[in-house]
Image (tube, rainbow, N blue to C red):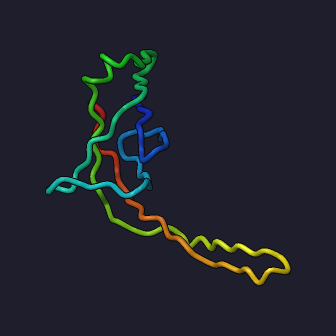
Amino acid sequence: MVYAVVRAGGRQEKVEVGTIVTMDRIKADEDGNVQLTPVLLVDGDKITSDAKSLAKVTVTAEVLNDLRGPKIVIQKFKNKTGYKKRQGHRQELTRIKITGIK
């Protein structure tokens, strides 16, 4: 069983070939592929975490689609002053599928 822990938009995700991951928006190349940076590689009993060895490892993924996350409502209120503020946010996301760990 081969899996890797990759850096994905400020977080780390455990991925295997065929895993679908939703992460912060990233740009793909013209073919719709993305290369992710591995932090850890597990190949059976062999665990690789050395930076020199991980430089040789490539984790490739294809972009399935771009989407937006759920709306987050931010409300601020101060009592007895008439201060009210309301704003919202929707995070830009990308859904990818892992195609290879080499």
Query: Which quadrant is home to the C terminus?
Result: top left
**Looking at the picture, does residue 20 appear above or below residue 82?**
above
Judge from the rendering whether residue 90 lies leftward or rightward of residue 61; answer left or right. Answer: right
**Looking at the picture, does residue 43 appear above or below residue 17?**
above
User: Farthest residue in the right direction?
Assistant: 80
Instruction: Name the image quarter holding residue 83.
Output: bottom right
User: Farthest residue in the bottom direction?
Assistant: 82
Q: Residue at x 27, y 52 (%)?
A: 62
Closer to the camera in the image, 36 or 10: 10
Judge from the rendering whether residue 71 lies leftward or rightward of residue 93; answer left or right. Answer: right
Q: Residue at x 37, y 58 (%)?
A: 25
Residue 47: x and y in percent read 44, 18
Instruction: Name the image quarter holding residue 72.
Output: bottom right
Residue 75: x and y in percent read 68, 74
Residue 21: x and y in percent read 43, 51
Query: Which quadrant is home to the N terminus?
Result: top left
Q: Residue at x 32, y 23 (%)?
A: 54
Residue 99: x and y in percent read 29, 44
